[in-house]
Image: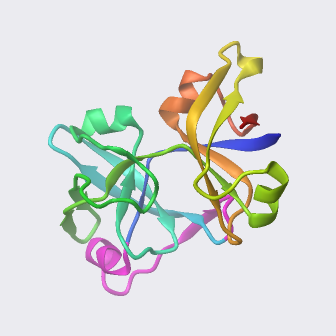
Amino acid sequence: MKIMVETSARHIHVTKEVFATLFGADATLTKKKDLSQPGQFACAEKVKVVGPKGEMMMSILGPERSATQVEVALTDARKLGIAAPVRESGDIAGTPGCKLVGPVGECEIECGVIAAKRHIHLTPEAAAEFGVTDKQIVSVKVGESTGRATTFGDVVVRVSPSYAPAMHIDTDESNAAGLSGTVDGEVIL
């Protein structure tokens, strides 16, 4: 069973309130390009993420969310000096926070910095075809053509009618397998 594998670089999801603090009360997200997941898009706006040891600019992904979340690779987390745990997107309780700096303001978030757990998005129909269920853990083999074939374990399946089939890994994981662009992965149950 093949799945498209995409590399998800460091980024931030913001609430309406945090966005207003960083960019101004009348500012709105500016769509730069659509992403593979329906309704998701990369924005023109960038935010400086500041940790105890360093800082880096990150793109905002839209639309706005109910909680602000910073997604980094573990290499990024070390550069920032933040002990980011590996978590599923949205599971931010008890995670470290950071300082966010925009063009018109800044704010401290108490929690929300994570290294996203590698995952597969599937519609219910695609999950049935693959023979998997929501929250099931699978493995995915990639990189056979790169000379760095890698099998990623602990890949969580996420099922929703609002998803499009795709696997997401971070830049550290992509670099380990020598991947560039989108590639096909083989799902192993």
Q: Position of residue 158 (x, y in %)?
A: 61, 57
* Occupied quadrant, residue 100: bottom left
- Please count the marks in the image: 0
Residue 125 lies left or right of residue 96; in this view the side is right
Judge whether 145 appears above or below 33 on screen. Answer: above
Judge whether 156 appears above or below 179 on screen. Answer: below
Residue 122 lies left or right of residue 11; in this view the side is right
Quadrant in which the C terminus appears: top right
Residue 46 lies left or right of residue 127; in this view the side is left
The magenta region covers: 15-38
Q: Position of residue 125 (x, y in %)?
A: 81, 64
Quadrant in which the N terminus appears: top right
The question of residue 106 being in magenta is answered with no
Frontmost residue, 52 versus 126 = 126
* Occupied quadrant, residue 75: top left
Frontmost residue, 179 versus 102 = 179
Q: Position of residue 59 (x, y in %)?
A: 45, 56
Q: Position of residue 68 (x, y in %)?
A: 35, 67
Please give the name of the residue rendered at 40% of the width and 52% of the height, measured from the top-left corner.
Answer: 58
Please give the name of the residue rendered at 28% of the width and 71% of the height, measured from the top-left corner.
Answer: 22
